[in-house]
């Protein structure tokens, strides 16, 4: 019951964070010199045209009124209109966000599926060549800029070896729109099109690997160090003394407690993941929020920018909330501590 | 190495004890090959940046120089990293690019670290509403991915090197506030703080002469690791076209510009990319080495 209240408090805090974010970005956008109406109309517009557009955009009202109008629109799911595409930002995002979401989901699965076993192996064979190789690879994953990894993979695997495609979500001429969930990998199966599914997967591999590299490295490192810490604990020694086979000790007694720090790190990693997604998307021409957001920034399309920032922020806050709940489920100490605080 | 707590106003024996601790630390550091490698790499980057006008084979390549006769030359003895689309020497541009990277690091950390540390000291020491206000604002900034925040802030300003640096600084201080806040929280109840309070020391004295010196190792490690990450985020921003504008030789911008000529003229993108990697790797190894040396927990 107390844990329930803890969750509720975390939820309210998340909402507060999003409100705070919207205020910060809104203030920065509106307070800075540069007239969005003039920029939208171009340098040849007359003063009268600019004033009219300013009035239409509501730019001549006091700041808090503008903010109020914006928030009331947000609550209704209305992000305003994009100056660039002339469509509602909401519909723009509805096509851009699932692309980013699919990439991020596949990346997380990849990072954990490869990172955790690597960490376990490195810890198990500590100081052997397995350990050293994985540590070096993890380090390079963490320090290499994701867009550079993306570029190198594109060059080596795409151009020189011709093994995988390097652009977009599907091959040109594939004429398939993922209209059920927005995720190609799911919708292709639902619509019974295995060829499209394979095509989508092939297009996902390089971007996902580039994006996963940094998180993979970090997850491997954290898993390795927490496995090493756990292996020194008394109950592990006791398990070994009882003659319990190594495999059982590793997975049942050591991996579960090591999972807590890994999960905690995942929340932080997700932050850099979202940021790096923007970079990787640009390299691979991925039709996600990155291209949309960057174009919006270069054209000072405020509604679009706010939309991208708010959606990304909300997504991030939601994922962190989920991770906190998961952490509470895995580690009763956190549940109790959280309820008490 | 057991840290000799930095107590204000040491005696002669305490001074030489500290010096001995330093020498011990240096010997331990030297025995960590990765850390030494990191130090060498960082020094190379600094030397390259500071000495670029002297070291670069073609210093004019850093500006608006063009040499169409030698465009798109692959790496050779004459041009170590090849030439770019207007014939500039890529190696020289990378050296000058390090100037921009280090400028970024100095600017961002020089602004955000003092500011963040100061706020963290206040929040950790005073508690109460001071703590609540400061930490809540910090949490809001920390709750959003760094690059997204930097993108949003740069969006509101015009993309340029200076505005990119301002954007990153605006969100960087939060990490240091949080770090110092947690550190001070744990140090607040130490005996020397109580002793100072009993002796009638002013708050300012306690903050700056008692607590701050004991945060120095934590700050040093974090600043070194930060340098790498600032370069990483800065490169990301300029890769997207939101940082330094041409013809300024910024490594991220060069990678983006060179990407147009893939895969044939790959060196124009790949060499600056390796330049970025070299710098980040150096700071990372050095920071890890420092952390192992000073035995610190930097979350």
Image (spheres, coloured by chain):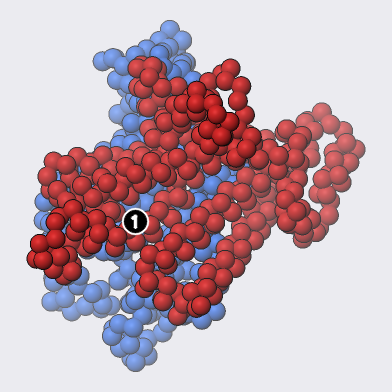
Chain colours: A red, B blue
User: Eyeballing the image, is A250 above or below B181?
Assistant: above
User: Eyeballing the image, is B5 above or below B227?
Assistant: below
Other-residue count near label 1 (Cα within 10 Å), few / some / many at <14 / 14–19 / ≥20 = many
Q: Position of residue B169 (x, y in %)?
A: 49, 52
Please name the residue that numbered disc 1 is placed on. Answer: A262
Where disc 1 sits, the SS reads helix
Residue in view at x 66 percent, y 47 percent: A306
- Which chain does the residue under circle 1 lie in? A
A37 or B298, nearer to the observer: B298
Q: How many numbered marks does the figure carry?
A: 1
Which residue appears farthest toward the front when viewing the image?
A192
- The answer to whether any part of residue B290 appears in the image is no
Q: Position of residue A80 (x, y in %)?
A: 76, 45
Residue in view at x 32 percent, y 52 percent: B224
Residue in view at x 45 percent, y 50 percent: A270
**Quadrant hosting residue A153:** top left
User: Eyeballing the image, is A287 above or below B166?
Assistant: above
Q: Position of residue A98 (x, y in %)?
A: 58, 39
User: Eyeballing the image, is A154 above or below A96?
Assistant: above
- The answer to whether any part of residue B127 appears in the image is yes
Q: Position of residue B164 (x, y in %)?
A: 53, 43
Residue in view at x 25 percent, y 73 percent: B6
Horizontal side of residue A20 vs A303, given as left or right: left
**Quadrant hosting residue A159:** top left
Horizontal side of residue A63 vs A175, given as left or right: right
């Amino acid at each position: 019951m107390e844990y329930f209240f803890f969750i509720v408090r975390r939820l309210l805090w998340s909402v507060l964070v999003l409100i705070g974010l919207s205020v910060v970005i809104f203030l920065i956008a509106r307070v800075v010199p540069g007239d969005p109406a003039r920029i939208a109309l171009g340098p040849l517009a007359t003063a009268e045209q600019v004033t009219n557009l300013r009035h239409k955009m509501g730019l001549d009202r006091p700041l808090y009124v503008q903010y109020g109008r914006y928030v009331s629109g947000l609550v209704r799911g209305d992000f305003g209109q994009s100056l660039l595409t002339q469509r509602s930002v909401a519909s723009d995002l509805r096509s851009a966000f699932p692309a980013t979401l699919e990439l991020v989901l596949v990346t997380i699965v990849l990072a954990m599926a490869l990172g955790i076993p690597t960490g376990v192996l490195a810890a198990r064979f500590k100081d052997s060549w397995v350990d050293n190789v994985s540590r070096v690879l993890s380090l390079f994953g963490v320090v290499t800029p994701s867009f550079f990894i993306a570029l190198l993979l594109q060059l080596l695997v795409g151009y020189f070896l011709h093994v995988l495609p390097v652009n977009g979500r599907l091959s040109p001429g594939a004429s398939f729109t993922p209209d059920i969930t927005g995720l190609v990998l799911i919708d292709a199966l639902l619509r019974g099109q295995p060829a499209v599914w394979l095509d989508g997967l092939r297009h996902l591999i390089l971007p996902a690997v580039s994006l996963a590299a940094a998180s993979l490295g970090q997850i491997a490192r954290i898993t390795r160090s927490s496995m090493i810490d756990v292996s020194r604990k008394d109950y592990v020694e006791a398990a070994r003394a009882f003659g319990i086979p190594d495999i059982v000790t590793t997975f049942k007694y050591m991996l579960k407690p090591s999972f807590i720090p890994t999960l905690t790190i995942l929340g932080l990693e997700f932050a850099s993941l979202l940021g790096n997604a923007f970079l990787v998307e640009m390299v691979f021409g991925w039709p996600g929020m990155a291209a949309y957001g960057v174009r919006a920034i270069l054209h000072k399309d405020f509604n679009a920018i706010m939309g991208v920032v708010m959606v990304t922020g909300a997504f991030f806050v939601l994922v962190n909330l989920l991770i906190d709940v998961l952490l509470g489920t895995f580690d009763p100490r956190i549940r109790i501590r959280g309820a008490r605080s | 190495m057991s840290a000799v707590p930095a107590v204000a106003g040491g005696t002669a024996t305490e001074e030489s004890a500290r010096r001995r601790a330093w020498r011990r630390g240096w010997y331990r550091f030297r025995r960590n090959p990765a850390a030494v490698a990191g130090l060498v790499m960082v020094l190379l980057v600094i030397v390259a940046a500071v000495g670029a006008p002297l070291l670069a084979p073609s210093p004019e390549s850093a500006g608006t120089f063009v040499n169409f006769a030698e465009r798109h030359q692959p790496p050779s003895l004459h041009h170590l990293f090849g030439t770019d689309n207007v014939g500039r020497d890529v190696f020289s541009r990378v050296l000058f690019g390090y100037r921009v990277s280090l400028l970024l690091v100095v600017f961002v950390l020089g602004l955000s670290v003092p500011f963040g540390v100061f706020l963290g000291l206040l929040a950790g020491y005073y508690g109460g509403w001071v703590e609540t206000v400061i930490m809540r604002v910090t949490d809001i900034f920390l709750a959003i991915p760094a690059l997204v925040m930097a993108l949003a802030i740069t969006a509101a300003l015009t993309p340029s090197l200076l505005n990119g640096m301002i954007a990153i600084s605006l969100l960087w201080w939060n990490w240091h506030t949080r770090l110092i806040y947690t550190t001070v929280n744990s140090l607040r109840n130490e005996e020397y703080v109580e002793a100072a309070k009993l002796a009638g020391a002013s708050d300012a004295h306690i903050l700056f002469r008692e607590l701050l010196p004991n945060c120095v190792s934590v700050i040093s490690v974090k600043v070194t690791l930060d340098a790498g990450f600032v370069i990483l985020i800065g490169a990301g921003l300029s890769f997207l076209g939101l940082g330094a504008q041409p013809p300024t030789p910024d490594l991220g911008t060069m990678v983006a510009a060179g990407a147009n000529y893939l895969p044939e003229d790959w060196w124009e993108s790949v060499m600056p990319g390796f330049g970025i990697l070299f710098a980040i790797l150096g700071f990372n190894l050095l920071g890890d080495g420092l952390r192992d040396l000073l035995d610190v927990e930097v979350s």
